[in-house]
Image (tube, grey):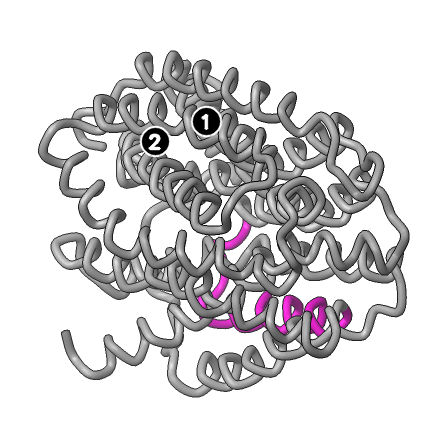
Amino acid sequence: MTSKERLLLFILAAVNFTHIMDFMIMMPLGPQLMGLFKINPQQFGFAVSAYSITAGISGFVAAFFVDRFDRKKLLFSAYIGFLLGTFACAFAPGYYALVAARVLAGLFGGMIGAQVLSIVSDSFPYERRASAMGVLMTAFSLASVAGVPSGLWLAAKYSWHIPFLAIALIGVAVAIGIYMFIPSMTKHIASDQPKGNPLYVLTDIMKSPNQMRALSLSAVLMMGHFSIIPFIAPSLVGNVGFRQDQIFLIYLVGGALTIFSAPLVGKLADKYGKFPVFSIFALISMIPVWLITNLWAMPIWVVLAISGFFFIAVNGRMIPTQALVSGVVSPQQRGGFMSINSSLQQLASGLAVTIAGSMVHEGDNGRLENYPMVGYFSIALIGVSIFLASRVKVEQNG
């Protein structure tokens, strides 16, 4: 790998890190924001889902026009819009202003992930692309291990505004890196291949039951995941007795464990098959999902062990799923299909938070009531996902 390729991947990983951090930091801030703004779990869930729903819509619309423009210019423009939304979060004076800022961040954030993947695909041949993608994926673990704990520490010591301000300031440096060091990406525009009907990607999906099943699998799995995640922190504070400055330990331990477990899961999926490995981890994940949503006052090390198990199991089912879903279309169709898939995941996660938020409510002494019902909802969706995965067929040239 050349020095230019390493620099490109470093900048794109930094883009992913700030993008992921902006989304992840909202969820563990739940107890602080609900107390400060005097809002209930449903209102907090709406604030979280506002980003996902907006990102899903913008990502869906972008799927039909992004291939007509320079990828660098699109990434830079979307990233600047995302930073404006993040700065707006940092200076939001109240709940409704924060929701509006999350909508603005999601509007542009929904286009970032697809552009990052497109740039990597254009820059690295297929034989070396997986290694490049592996570098990008470290951004998620780094966000869990270092980013979220640091953000929660800043929020506990100073204010909930500070983590968003820190992300935005880091993002300014990243934006400069995009502008100065990422080359213009226009080879796809100069291609002699006919562009065709911009709605072709959608009509092609509608005609393929296999693609529809793959998208359904992705959406159902994401709903099961994001019905649980946003309310872990409020339940730890209200039901288990965690202090707000202890919540970062969940992400620190979980992120550190997935750094080691994720590569192993990928190797197992390649060796023994995507569906068998997915099924095993999906079934195993039902255990920590039940435990996470039924926690009571217990030693902190027990909670960390359970949450670490949760992170490993959830991460273990997502890796083979992405490989399975990406194999249902030919390489010529994959870009548009994966854009639709990403958009659907965002919408599904937003819907999941809304549904879960309608189930739970704050009881006496700050307890989060009915969280076990959300766990059963998630477990049911995991069962549906196993059935859907069993019916997804990988294309011969996928």
Quadrant housing residue 141: bottom left
Residues at marks 2 and 1 touching, judged by CB atoms closer than 8 Å: yes
- Whether 151 is drawn above or below 339: the answer is below
Element under disc 1: helix
Residue 336 appears in view: yes
Element under disc 2: helix
Instruction: Tell me where the magenta segment starts and ends, as one range.
Output: 65-88
Most extreme residue toward the left is 271
- Whether 101 is drawn above or below 239: the answer is below
Q: Earlier in the sequence, mark 2 or mark 1?
A: 1
Residue drawn at the location 45% of the way across and 84% of the way down? 177
For residue 248, side relative to residue 355 (left or right)? left
Q: Residue 204, percent across and down? A: 44, 25
Q: To which residue does mark 2 refer? A: 325
Residue type, numbered disc 2: Val
Quadrant housing residue 105: bottom right
Nearer to me, 383 or 233: 233
Nearer to me, 344 or 37: 37
Residue drawn at the location 66% of the way across and 69% of the way down? 81
- Whether 324 is drawn above or below 77: the answer is above
> Is residue 178 part of the magenta span, yes or no?
no
For residue 374, side relative to residue 195 (left or right)? right
SS assignment for the magenta stretch, majority: helix
Q: Residue 274, percent across and down? A: 22, 29
Residue drawn at the location 53% of the way across and 61% of the way down? 248
- Whether 122 is drawn above or below 225: the answer is below
- CA distance for labels 2 and 1: 7 Å
Q: Quadrant of the N terminus?
A: bottom left
Q: Which mark is residue 215?
A: 1
Residue drawn at the location 71% of the way across and 25% of the way down? 370
Dot 1, crowdedness within 10 Å: few (<14), some or many (≥20)?
A: many
